[in-house]
Image (cartoon, rainbow, N blue to C red):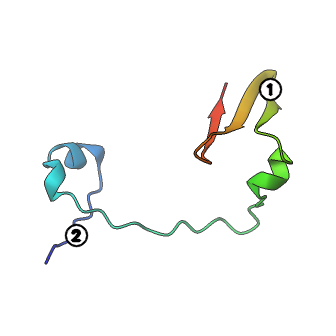
Amino acid sequence: MSTTALLSTPAELLSRPLGLLRLKSQAVTPEPGTRRIASHALLAGERELVITHQGSEYHLRLTRNDKLILTK
């Protein structure tokens, strides 16, 4: 039987051996009114999308392993 420890600070995480850490995954609840859009709707069949923000370009890419990567 394993016990789950909730640690509140990064220092606490680093002070324990990795084998002893068992962190609970907590569901993330979006704020009311948070917009959601599916990645396939953004990418529209493409593998890359360029997003402009405050004069900079960001590239949202879909990898071969179906992961999303955002780079500047």
Residue picked out by circle 2: 4
Task: Residue at 27%, 64% (x, y): give it.
Answer: 6
Inspect the image, locate mark 1, and give the three-letter code of the amino acid beneath it: Gln
Residue 37, compared with residue 51, is above or below; it is: below
Q: Residue at x 43, y 68 (%)?
A: 26
In x, y percent, where is residue 46? 82, 41
32 sits to left or right of 27: right
- The circle drawn on residue 14 is none
Return the x and y of residue 8 as percentages of the image width and height.
30, 56
Q: Label 1 crowding class (10 Å Cα cut-off): few <14, some 14-19, many 20+?
A: few
**Which mark is nearer the camera, 2 or 1?**
2
68 with respect to 52 (left or right): left
Count of numbered circles on the image: 2
Q: In terms of image quadrants, where is residue 65? A: top right
Label located before the other in sequence (2 or 1):
2
The residue furthest front is 64
Quadrant in which the C terminus appears: top right
Q: Which mark is residue 54?
A: 1
